Image (tube, grey):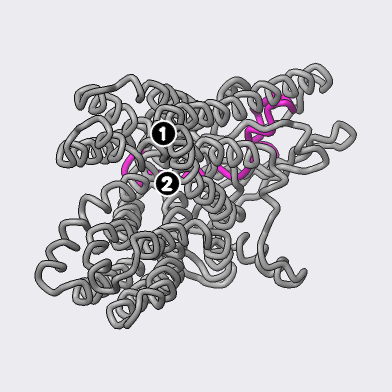
Amino acid sequence: MESHLHNKQIIPKYYIYHLLHTINYCRNRNNDSCRIVSYYLPRCSLSSLRNESIYLIIFFTQTEYHDISKKVNAGKSCVDFHLIASPPRIRINVKMTNDPTSEAGFHIEETHDDTETTESSNRKLRQPDTYWSWVVCAAGFTCNIIVLGCGLCYGVLFPSLLDEFKRGKSDTAWVGSLALTAGGICGPVAGRLTDRFGARAMVICGALLCAAGLLFTSLVPSLYLMFLTYGGMYGFGSSLVYIAVYVIVPRYFVKRRSLAIGLITVSAGASLLVMSPVCQALLDAFGWRGTFRGLGCIVLIVFFIGWALDPNVASEENEEVSERSKTCKARQSGKILDFSMWTDITFVAITISSSVVFIGHYIPMIHLSRYCEDLGISADLASWLYSCIGAASVLARIPGSKLCDVFGPQSVFLISSAVGAVEAILLPLATNWTGLLCLSIVYGISDGLMAIGAILSVLCTLTPTQKAQGFGFFQLCICMTALCGPPIGGWIADKTNSYHAAFFFAGGIKVVGVVILVVFNFWGRRDLTQEKNQIDQGIEIHL
């Protein structure tokens, strides 16, 4: 095999941090033309990777030999690889190190088996970017719509629960809030379980737990038991499904990963539009107890759909094998949760920035109805503003995934957050329904683009073995700050007897979050330039 290595490729050391993990090229059986893959990788300070090695594994599966051209731009987060042709199967393991005193190396292995298998099974691995990938995406989309919708439609049941239990609005609202926030609070635990047992098992178990929680909720004699059955059981079950879907779907995509994740994020907004009418119809026909039973039966659909989420997929670095290996190591060392992602400055910066932004993000939306009341706008017209926000958010997420492909997810997140900050600051200037409608549409678009940008930024930062728990930690952080934001806005409004200061605070705190990530990117690029001047021309790799 060494005799075939005729092409010389120079890879400068200061570009190596772009190449975090594995990029698999799988031959399209119906098309022998070259495939172009765009894979988003986050920027990070090279100093944070000091004394750590990075492995790049490339698979070639076409019939002739290869000629790879790499376009790497330190100012962007996108790396393009153009594959022309290759032998039946060659694995090139390139070991790069950021320690100038060490030597980087590579070795080449040739295999003759057309299909990879896992260590524990002889089953053929499904290939990414096939028809089955879209089946998995559709399954994850449906799972999120059903499970998240059962929590978001709690507002439909709210008046009936007030009449039934005769408790205050605050106590009754806390039940629904706990069910919604449990998805974020339990995120790290759900991610750990997903690492341990796999995404499909967690979707199935989560569906059963949600169904049981909804069924038991229909039988409770007091409101406080709903904290356990609805807020606890259903909330934790929904967290298992939500985290597992975001882990398994990206594994099935390389070329259109951003689009697939964009579709999954759409499900969060579409769930309210789909499940609210269903919940209202059940409530009119069977009452609130019958509604919870009906929702429990609907959630069981997720149990059957979950079987389509096959974990045997030839994704980056054979994630299933590497995750199992890491889990065994963690178990041997007594670790319950993996905190290794917190040593990655990129993940930390994105998480801190997003958490600060989400402090102010929901303040305008939560208090918009009362602000309309203060302006003398009717409740019916105010409800239309919420519908416009939801529709704009859903419609913005699909083109948002394409924008992430073009400009990078961090850029989309930063720009949309800045636009949302301007919208919040301008909100006090809108004194009629038309002005509020325009700003509501801007807010909805900003919300949709922020969601896809933040999620893609985090998922592309994490390694395959960190994605489940890392995404869970990210959800925990933004959930906690988002939960605190609206009460802070309400407190400011009470102290100042006006919502103007609250909206100014919302816009200002979002600007702070944007500045945090901008400063990080600036210092990261400066560190990159320093490393570039210090490190030699590059490493010669003969391909």
Q: Which residue is mark 1?
A: 497
**Label 1 Cα neighbours within 10 Å, binned few <14 / some 14-19 / many ≥20:** few
**Lateral position of residue 65 relative to residue 233, left or right:** right
Answer with mark 2 or mark 1, whichever residue precedes in sequence.
2
Of residues 270 and 503, the one drawn nearer to the viewer in this rendering:
503
Residue at figure coordinates x 46%, y 46% from the top left: 487
Of residues 46 and 342, the one drawn nearer to the viewer in this rendering:
342
Q: Amino acid at mark 1?
A: Asn
Q: Which residue is mark 2?
A: 253
Q: Amino acid at mark 2?
A: Phe
Residue at figure coordinates x 16%, y 57% from the top left: 277
Q: Position of residue 439 (x, y in %)?
A: 30, 26
Res. 124 in view: no
Residue at figure coordinates x 72%, y 67% from the top left: 335
Q: Label 2: state its secondary structure.
A: loop
Q: Position of residue 429 (x, y in %)?
A: 33, 19
**Lateral position of residue 187 relative to residue 211, left or right:** right
Residue at figure coordinates x 90%, y 34% from the top left: 101
Where residue 512 sits, quadrant-wise, is top right
Tell me where the magenta segment starts and ends, as one range.
Answer: 2-31
Of residues 302 and 230, the one drawn nearer to the viewer in this rendering:
230
Q: Position of residue 163 (x, y in %)?
A: 23, 69
Of residues 168 and 311, the one drawn nearer to the viewer in this rendering:
168
The relative height of residue 383 versus residue 194 in the rendered view (above or below) is above
Total labels drawn: 2
**Label 2 Cα neighbours within 10 Å, binned few <14 / some 14-19 / many ≥20:** many
Q: Position of residue 257 (x, y in %)?
A: 42, 42
Q: Label 1: state its secondary structure.
A: loop
**Lateral position of residue 426 relative to residue 342, left or right:** left
